[in-house]
Image (spheres, helix red, strand yellow):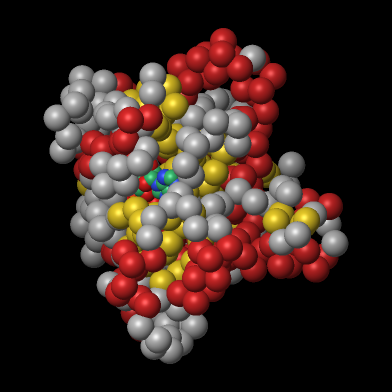
Amino acid sequence: MIKIKYCVDVDRSVLISNFEKREWIHVGPEDEWNFYWTSIQTCRCLFNADKNYRLKDNQIINHFPNHYELGRKDLLIRNIRRYRREMLKSGTPIAKCIRGTFLYLDFIPTTYVLPVDYHLFLEEYHRNPSTWIVKPCGKSQGAGIFLIDKLSQLKKWSKKKKYPRNSSITKETYIISRYIENPLLISGKKFDLRLYVLVTSFHPLKAYLFKFGFCRFCSVKYNSHVTDINCLFAHLTNVSVQKEGDDYNSIHGGKWPTKNLKLYLASTRGEERTQKLFDDISWIIIHSLKAVRSVMSHDTHCFECYGYDIIVDQNLKPWLIEVNSSPSLTCTTSSDQLLKSKLIDSIVSVVLPPSGIPNCRWDKNPSPESLVNFDVLIDELQ
Ligand SMILES: Nc1ncnc2c1ncn2[C@@H]1O[C@H](COP(=O)(O)OP(=O)(O)OP(=O)(O)O)[C@@H](O)[C@H]1O
């Protein structure tokens, strides 16, 4: 039996224990690997045009070369804006738009890229001030994020400079999004949903939703802090932020499986509304993927597991907050360990052909058994 040679350079434990269980052989990046689970930085180097590196048929890798079209905050916004324009032009009913608001494609909070869109943001701010959240595009885990409710807090960008629209990402590139002020609260606390989506191909689009996501709760009640925009423990659900707070619970890590959320919602809002919420979430994910499809690589060596962050508001409307191309595989609790181990195992089962050996020429039609932990979001060939 041929043994798969794997290479890995991120969050190792949950990955390595899975690969070892499969009796795969660990090799270095310079060796003849079949399966590479890499960081986005290494992936960027590997697919760098100057390197002229060609993958063989029996090599597969866990990122698409231009994963950032979905995973970078400013590009996600630009791709969704372009997708809406294209849909509107094509006259499809899902692009229905009334007084500038899309009825069905309004799933991302109004967002501008700073500094280039500063003046567009100003116009919107004067129409409807409210609270906004500012996030650096080049950082993650809540780093550098702050909330504003006055223009004076944005002094840095107010100088009348001209910025080229196509300037690339710098340390100074931010996005500013309308803050969702009415999140659904459970026991008075804000939470968001972390869901995992496996994409095995963008052409045709094949995407699967992992059945076991979770909610990440703030440790401080939202109600009393809603006016205190500086209390990040009430506003940002990132575990990396919450961990620093006095009220963080390291046993459950402020996490709840989505199964608990479904049960809670079914008992408080009814089965039908709960089902609609989860259908709407699937719909958002499918359209976010369709929004980037035209710019995504056709490379059949690639698959990708995206971490979707969704906030649900009090009307049970889901909002897409962010898509992570490299969702954390670090385990903060024992249930985390179980969930992430199951995630990796399920992904590997789907991306390997029945022969068990990576093959980029395989038609990527996984068996029903290998899809047991996923819901099919879209498979354009089926
Ligand atoms: N528009 C919004 N309205 C309300 N809350 C928001 C909004 N955008 C972000 N948040 C909160 O801020 C948190 C951090 O935002 P986001 O996930 O975009 O940043 P990040 O630093 O890139 O995090 P990650 O580590 O997940 O990549 C979210 O988990 C959410 O709780």
Q: Between 72 and 81, which is closer to the camera in this rendering?
A: 81
For the N terminus, give its image quadrant: top left
The residue drawn where x is 52% and y is 47% is 320
Q: How many marks?
A: 0
**Image location of residue 24, percent across then percent down:** 29, 40
The residue drawn where x is 45% and y is 74% is 118
Q: Between 256 and 242, which is closer to the camera in this rendering?
A: 242
For the C terminus, give its image quadrant: top right
**Image location of residue 106, percent across then percent down:** 65, 51
Q: Residue furthest top?
A: 267
Q: Is residue 71 above or below residue 118?
A: above
Residue 326 visible: no
**Image location of residue 339, percent across then percent down:** 36, 27
The residue drawn where x is 35% and y is 83% is 159
* Residue 238: quadrant of the picture: top left
Q: Is residue 178 above or below residue 45?
A: above
Residue 260 visible: yes
Left or right: residue 341 versus residue 179 is left
Left or right: residue 254 versus residue 261 is left
The residue drawn where x is 49% and y is 30% is 184
**Image location of residue 240, percent across then percent down:** 23, 42
Q: Between 307 and 167, which is closer to the camera in this rendering?
A: 167
Left or right: residue 298 versus residue 145 is right
